Image: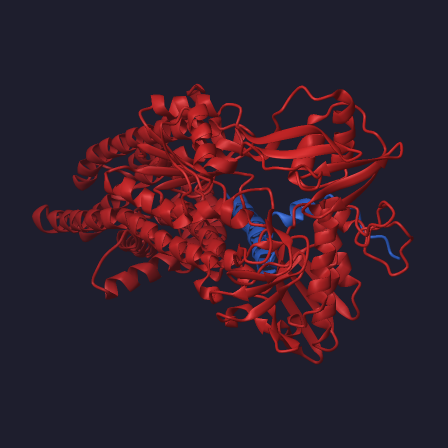
Chain colours: A red, B blue
Amino acid sequence: MESAAISAQPTPDRPLGACLHCGAAVPHGTDFCCSGCEAAYGANEAISAQFGFAALAHDLGENEHSLTLGVEGIHCASCIRFIENALAGGEGVSEARVNMSTERMTVRWQGPKERADALATSVTKLGYKLHPLTDEAAPQTDQEKRLLRAIAVSGFATANMMLLSMGLWASTTETMGMATRELMHWISALIAMPTVIYAGQPFFNSALGILKERRTNMDVPISLAVVLATAMSLFETMNKGEHVYFDSAVMLLFFLLIGRYLDARAKGKARSSAVQLLARLQGFATVEEGEKTVQVPMRDLREGMTVRVAMGENIPADGVVVSGTSSADLSLITGETVPETVSEGSEVFAGTLNVSAPIRVQVSKASEKSLLSEIVKLMEVAEQGQSQYVRLADAAARLYTPVIHSMGALTFLGWWLVMQAPWQVSLLNAVTVLIITCPCALGLAVPVVQVLASGRLMKRGILLKSGDALEKMARINAVVFDKTGTLTLGRPTLVSTRHDPKYMALAASMASHSKHPLSVALADAFGGSLIDLNVRESQGQGLSAEHDGIELRLGSRKWCEIEGEADDAALEIWLSVDGVAKERFEFADKLRPDATEAVASLKEAGLHVELLSGDRKAVAETVAVDAGIDAFSAEVTPVEKCDRLKSLQATGHSVMMAGDGLNDAAAMAFADVSISPASAVDITQNTADVVFQGDELKPVATTYNTARKAMSLVKQNFALAVVYNVVAIPLAIMGHVTPLVAAIAMSGSSLVVILNSFRLNLMRDK
Amino acid sequence: MDILLYLIPIALSLGLVGLVGFMWALKNDQFDDMEGNAHRILLDDEEEE
């Protein structure tokens, strides 16, 4: 659909029998080659009638303007090029840039502000949807950039100082002259001083901030150790002493900054998800006012207003259809892939897509009270709850830091007052204690395992999105599955067999002309060669064609003029030949091929497995039985899903939620940890801690097993690091740790932790 | 050990060149879109029309 949609623009002088949108050949009497083109064409017709984007353009002075908009549907390199070329072709455009990571486009032009609408229309004509942004700030926050700069500076300093330090460590005053040693110390000081001042800022600022609140965090001992080590080294350098440890201070900063940066990036990604979702409610709606229509921002819609929704437009608010019959893509809310037919009296939801015909909708709820907004609110609440959980790590650090401080202080006082040592030696020992207790091996214990585990999972098509996903997953004792798209493939496949080969060929040939999910499934199921037919599509009803002078119809019961209702709940389409119904094709959303196996292996691991479906009871029950799940609930609303998770959590369960629809998004945010297939809607993938690819369900079990193994390795690493501390700290306090020994001990303990972590790769797949 | 007087400054300035290069790239938003540029490289150059 995409390649068709972007292959060409509609031209006024199109040849007869060409698609209005893409220009591909179409049967006589129809305007579009497929419903995708029809929707895209409808969308740009609708949007070109809106003059809202000009208001969003920024005035850069001297008659220059810029506009930044969110773009939906960028998937590949050609998408970037099509959009940029379309924009660059506009009058007076000086710059057009698409950012694929953040799905935004920016365009600058010389000329009137109003040109924004024409430029935006040139992109929507290609079939991409545009939406205004709530925050136009650079996606990569200033904080991340500051950290990156600090990493670069400290990395440069570390590398160069190591060159010097290696020489100093390997030699003594006998093998290297005093003058040379002094030169090296001075050069080290020259590099280290600016580095510590610049790259240490993230820690110093955080430490000062928290000290003002009369509390401490890990940044306090880090800052203290770095400042003391640097100050003392400087003093020693000036006095031609030997206790020079600039390298330790700078290297410590470098490693800690890397961890800080990775942490900041992970958090930034999670934040953007809710904002993206609400972008669907940021545009304008066409509201009827007496005889006229006016453009009203969606957020100003109020109960009782009547809005017109064109083909391909998002429905702006929850409401009831007043007139018109169309099919609506409700997958955002329900997770069901087959568009539903809506007509007078049907309820529709904000953010869903009106596919095939214009409708008029009476607003029943203001957009900030719509179901979509409710879901976003639920997610925000849940995410705040989780970040509180993350702060537990800080709380542990708060307990640990006073211990470090007092040990350092006691060491200094002990040496100076009790042992009557010179103050340099006392301070040196105190700093050594501060550095050696600084959890280098402890700090590596988690990240190394995480990097290895995520690399291992990545090779199997599983993406870990949040830093603590493994940690949380290792603790779960219950798994809740969504049905459509999670346990099942989320798309219908042909399940009826034994069709007359002749009719099958005719039906598949007709179906190949349509993009309706059932048609696609039918065409996919047919392996033979297609018959050349002239097919017409009537939206929401079916297909018709002529073959050897006989009329063929493929579609719903009504379309094929069959009396009576279906006797079962299966999805079906019929083929009628010359007005006589001949063949019934049944479809079902099949289970993922290894669903039963995967569920069994999760159960074997002692997990409680449950199914929560928004679908009818009969369907949910069939799927639950097939997959081997005993506990299931059907016809569950998104809010009820959250409630069910909460009640599970209240009974002491730690829950993993596996889902793919928007209706799961809130529940996934509430769950302790969440996983979704790559076919899920964007917002759900953004919420999920883990995303997996492919048609199999096994990745859920694989991730769980890997998480368990990874966490046991983390615990071992912690034990190793603690053993190291227990041995090394007393030695440091007693002053037995020379710099060389400290270097070996520190890197040794880190090495042991890393080697232990690599055992993860020895694990076999179950 | 006189050689140190040359080699250390050389090593430092090489490192500085790399550091300045990185800072320049960061300042010019080269790291803003990690995905788009990976795809962009696959496109042929624009032909002037």
Name the residue furthest left: A418
Residue A258's spot in the image, x, y percent?
43, 47
Q: Would residue A68 be seen by someone viewing this image from the given angle?
A: yes
Residue A92's spot in the image, x, y percent?
78, 71
Image quarter hosting the C terminus of chain A: top left
In the rendered image of this protein, does residue A632 appear above or below residue A211? above
Quadrant housing residue A88 = bottom right
* Residue drawn at point x = 40 percent, y = 53 percent: A379
Name the residue furthest front: A563
Q: Would residue A250 be seen by someone viewing this image from the given angle?
A: no
The residue lying toward the viewer, choosing from A503 and A729, is A503
The residue lying toward the viewer, choosing from A530 and B24, is A530
Residue A322's spot in the image, x, y percent?
58, 63
The residue lying toward the viewer, choosing from A739 and A96, is A96
Residue A310's spot in the image, x, y percent?
67, 61
Q: Is residue A223 left or right of residue A99?
A: left
* Residue drawn at point x = 48 percent, y = 39 percent: A676
